[in-house]
Image (cartoon, coloured by chain):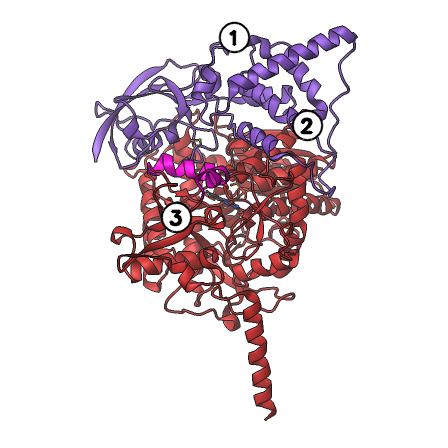
């Protein structure tokens, strides 16, 4: 058996380790050196109901918070699986030597995060993603020395090789130094290629997160699920090249959001949401800030920012827990956050939507699997903070086992497949690159990306309207026309990053159309998707996964029921506790049955 | 928006001749060096008004945590994403790191740093990924010390600054030494402490450090490389002495995970 993992963030590295430790070989293909994957950016922490603070937390409670946070759009069984596995995964990472922040007794410490009332987030200072990624990177390096893992770093994934029966048998990738395009044979291909922030540009994501492999799979027939569910993080700071995140962990450690009203500080989240305060789920917090700034006109200096304040906290204590984040603020905003409140605003952060997968992490193309931010399975309509890292690690472990089962059931392996199948896909990809290298028109690819970014950030964010979404789609179609008039500027055959970027650009356009199409389709407000025209959640008609199928003329959508077999969806409120909501619902039910009896 | 002049040392490939090219680039507020390079991508025209190819460089996170964007900026090795234009003297001069094979323009190949990590067995060996309960307890003070080293991004700035990393030497470099300490300070990692010390006792190891102390000055993560190397020096010497006393062979092999 031969396995291909594409992407070496948390999900990809975990999958790699799982396969290698079973004695199988992995080709690990990655756009960047895996140690530099976007997972390094994660700051705040990783969730798992280890329950060390006497709060009565449990995996079921974590599960329930996650469903509520996601406005019930996630299929429930895999989410429960994740929450049950989470404490064990945190322990595993601990055994690998992750320098998690400790209690005085030397145990793991936990902090609070959004959308929950308990301390469930393990963390390593404020660079948790970096520390987790490094621990996995080290284990993979060990497996490299054992000859089990073969890395192809600085390679761009281009497409899956699909045989006449519609089964994935490998992939095509390009060496970004020599520009060689070659095929890789594999009985299972696992895409762990991360998010798509570059579609928005103004984002907290790494600049490499173009979502290109997911888009390529989508264009080859993989369903793209819930594309409209894009997370806008409430607390980001500016920058000319990209935006930067001020972790939710800062609020978990006591940071407060406020602005001036009638000349006095107004802690609006605490006023509106007494139970959860500054730690409501992210979509709610972003809408809160949006309301303050755009509807009430109370943003700082009349703009879109509010304060995130830690000046009331003991400086040494907060410095120790949040050094990485505070340094980012110092460096990029040029002010001292322990003395002056930080100025923050909402910006694109994460994609809940992604490639459709089944409970075995397999896409609708047999043999092609996906795990991590590039798939849609764990977060529904909104992701809770610190749930991504755990979902990546969990999905990585699941897929590592499931590919093995899948391959055992195969009648024919990839080595039995005619080389013609590989050659044909390779020829298609080579022809694509040759075409790009001949582009000699007047349009600049980076400028086209900027134009897409402006539309996506402005119109497909916190609040969406039909008109603006339609305008954005029109703009995307215009850009796709202008793509034909691109110039490549660089026709070289060595490390030609411009040509590679042009290939990604098209893939970003296709994803953007999926996002806009899904947003236009969903006629309700749920989680991150908020349309004042349809202000309420509509479970009767829209408790559905939107599935985009690629066609040359644009995405075609179908709807799939959500598996709500474990928990009945409740109203989503953060002004009172969950217990209160359940109590009120029970009282209402009792009252109405009494009414009925009369 | 004001303009700034950028002077960039370019090279089309490993075997091509380097050349200098200048650009005049508009500077937005809070711009860093990466913003300037992005601006060149949008308008690849040099100072003389001649169309040219966009400059090639490495970067991902843009928040000084992935280590990709190291380059020599006004003579100092550092992260381009953390180099704010306002704080730099002008014209801004950009060069690739010189201690690594050049790929193109400002992009270099730092693979050797990753290979060195294999030599020093830079991992905590585990029995497998299956459930075995929590890891060992770690004192907060030990965790603090390890955390600092664990922030190393393998960016290569210390290699660039170190005079003992050069074509005539196999010196693995300051960061690699620090990684030995990172794993030796972990309760499980410490079980194989001697093997790591042996790995840096030989060729390319700690004896190649001439104590120039440049590494610590350029480290973007402020890792106390100098004191770590001094400590390891003592430990390798002590181990060498002990071995000589006992006339013993090396310790047991590093257990394989799985
Ligand atoms: C600033 C920031 C802070 C965050 N903080 C937290 C947090 O505290 N807690 C939390 O739970 N989540 C957090 N998140 C979210 C979380 O970091 C990500 O969702 C998660 O790391 C994604 O991991 P991944 O394994 O799916 O992909 P990534 O880590 O993004 O890795 C993707 C991999 O795919 C490869 N790849 C991409 N494109 C290609 C291609 N074309 N060809 C070949 N390979 C390719 C890349 O090289 C890379 O190795 C944060 C996100 C951001 C932006
Ligand atoms: S781009 Fe990651 S360190 Fe600069």
The residue at the point 32 percent across, 63 percent down is: A467
Left or right, A344 with respect to A355, comes to left
* Earlier residue among tags 2 and 1: 2
**Image mark count:** 3
Chain appearing in purple on the rendered image? B
Residue B1 place in picture, x, y as percent: 21, 36
Where is mark 1, residue-wise?
A: B210
Where is mark 2, residue-wise?
A: B189
Left or right, A285 with respect to A223, comes to left
A237 falls in the magenta region: no
Which of the 4 image quarters holds residue A147? top right
Chain under disc 1: B
The mark closer to the camera, 3 or 1, is: 3
Left or right, A378 with respect to B81, comes to right
Residue B214 place in picture, x, y as percent: 45, 15
Query: Which of the pair A414/B204 is nearer the observer?
Result: B204
Chain under disc 2: B
Write down the colour of chain A: red
Where is mark 3, residue-wise?
A: A309
Residue A474 place in picture, x, y as percent: 33, 55
Which of the 4 image quarters holds residue A104? top right
A319 falls in the magenta region: yes
Residue B105 place in picture, x, y as percent: 38, 22
The residue tagged with tag 3: helix, strand or loop? strand
CA separation, marks 2 and 3? 40 Å
Q: What's the magenta region?
A: A314-335
CA separation, marks 3 and 1? 46 Å
Query: Which of the pair A549/B20 is nearer the observer?
Result: B20
Which of the 4 image quarters holds residue A523? bottom left
């Amino acid at each position: 058996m031969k396995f291909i993992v594409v992407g070496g963030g948390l999900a990809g590295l975990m999958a790699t380790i799982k396969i290698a430790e079973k004695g199988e070989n992995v080709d690990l293909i990655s756009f960047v050196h895996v140690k530099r994957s976007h997972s390094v950016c994660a700051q705040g922490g990783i969730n798992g109901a280890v329950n060390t603070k006497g709060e009565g937390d449990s995996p079921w409670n974590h599960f329930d918070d996650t469903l509520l946070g996601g406005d019930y759009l996630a299929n429930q069984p895999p989410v429960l699986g994740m929450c049950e596995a989470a404490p064990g995964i945190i322990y595993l990472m601990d055994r690998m030597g992750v320098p998690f922040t400790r209690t005085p007794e030397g145990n793991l410490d936990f902090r609070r995060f959004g959308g929950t009332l308990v301390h469930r987030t393990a963390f390593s200072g404020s660079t948790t993603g970096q520390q987790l990624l490094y621990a996995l990177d080290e284990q993979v390096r060990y497996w490299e020395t054992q000859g089990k893992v073969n890395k192809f770093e600085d390679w761009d994934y281009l497409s899956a090789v699909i045989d006449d029966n519609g089964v994935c048998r490998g992939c095509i990738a390009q060496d970004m130094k020599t520009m060689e395009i070659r095929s890789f044979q594999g009985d299972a291909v696992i895409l762990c290629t991360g998010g798509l922030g570059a579609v928005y540009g103004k984002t907290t994501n790494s600049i490499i997160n173009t979502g290109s492999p997911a888009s390529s799979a989508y264009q080859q027939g993989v369903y793209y699920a819930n594309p409209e569910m894009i997370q806008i993080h409430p607390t980001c700071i500016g920058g000319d090249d990209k935006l930067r995140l001020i972790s939710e962990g800062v609020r978990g450690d006591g940071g407060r959001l406020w602005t001036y009203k009638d000349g006095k500080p107004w802690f609006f989240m605490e006023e509106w949401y007494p139970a959860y305060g500054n730690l409501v789920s992210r979509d709610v917090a972003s809408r809160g800030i949006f309301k303050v700034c755009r509807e009430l006109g109370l943003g700082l200096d009349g703009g879109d920012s509010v304060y995130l304040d830690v000046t009331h906290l003991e400086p040494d204590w907060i410095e120790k827990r949040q050094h990485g984040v505070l340094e980012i603020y110092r460096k990029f905003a040029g002010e001292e956050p322990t003395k002056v409140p930080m100025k923050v605003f909402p910006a694109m952060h994460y994609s809940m939507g992604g490639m459709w997968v089944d409970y075995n992490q397999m896409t609708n193309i047999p043999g092609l699997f996906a795990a991590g931010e590039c798939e849609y399975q764990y977060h529904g309509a909104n992701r809770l903070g610190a749930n991504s890292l755990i979902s990546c690690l969990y999905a990585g472990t699941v897929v590592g086992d499931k590919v093995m089962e899948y391959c055992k059931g195969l009648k024919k392996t990839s080595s039995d497949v005619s080389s013609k199948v590989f050659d044909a896909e390779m020829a298609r990809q080579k022809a694509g690159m040759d075409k790009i290298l001949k582009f000699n028109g007047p349009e600049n690819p980076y400028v086209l990306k900027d134009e897409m970014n402006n539309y996506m950030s402005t119109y497909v964010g916190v609040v969406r309207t039909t008109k603006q979404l339609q305008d954005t789609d029109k703009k995307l179609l215009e850009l796709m026309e202008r793509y034909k008039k691109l110039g490549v500027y660089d026709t070289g055959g060595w490390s030609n990053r411009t040509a590679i970027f042009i290939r990604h650009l098209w893939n970003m356009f296709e994803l953007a159309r999926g996002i806009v199409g899904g947003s236009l389709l969903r006629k309700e407000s749920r989680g991150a998707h908020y349309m004042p025209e349809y202000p309420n959640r509509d479970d009767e008609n829209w408790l559905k996964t939107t599935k985009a199928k690629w066609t040359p003329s644009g995405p075609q959508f179908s709807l799939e029921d959500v598996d709500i077999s474990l928990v009945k969806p409740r109203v989503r409120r953060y002004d009172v506790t969950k217990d209160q909501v359940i109590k009120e619902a029970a009282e209402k039910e009792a009252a109405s049955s009494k009414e009925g009896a009369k | 928006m004001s303009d700034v002049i950028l002077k960039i040392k370019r090279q089309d490939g490993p075997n091509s001749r380097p050349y200098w090219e200048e650009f005049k680039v508009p500077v937005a507020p809070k711009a860093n060096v990466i913003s300037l390079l992005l601006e060149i991508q949008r308008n690849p025209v040099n100072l003389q008004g001649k169309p040219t190819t966009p400059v090639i460089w490495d970067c991902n996170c843009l928040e000084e945590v992935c280590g990709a964007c190291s380059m020599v900026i006004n003579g100092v090795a550092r992260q381009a994403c953390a180099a704010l234009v306002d704080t730099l003297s002008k014209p801004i001069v950009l060069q690739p790191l010189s201690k690594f094979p050049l790929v193109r323009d400002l992009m270099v190949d730092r693979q050797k740093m990753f290979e060195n990590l294999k030599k020093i067995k830079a991992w905590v060996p585990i029995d497998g990924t299956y459930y075995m309960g929590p890891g060992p307890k770690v004192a907060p003070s030990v965790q603090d010390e390890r955390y600092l080293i664990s922030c190393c991004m393998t960016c290569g700035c210390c290699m660039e600054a170190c005079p003992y990393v050069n074509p005539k030497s196999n010196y693995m470099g300051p960061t690699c030494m620090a990684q030995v300490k990172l794993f030796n300070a972990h309760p499980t990692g410490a079980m194989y402490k001697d093997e790591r010390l042996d790995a840096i006792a030989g060729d390319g190891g700690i004896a190649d450090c001439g104590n120039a102390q440049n590494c610590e000055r350029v480290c973007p993560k402020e890792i106390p490389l100098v004191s770590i190397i001094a400590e390891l020096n003592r430990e390798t010497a002590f181990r060498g002495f002990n071995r000589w006393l006992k006339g013993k062979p090396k310790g047991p092999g590093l257990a394989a995970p799985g």
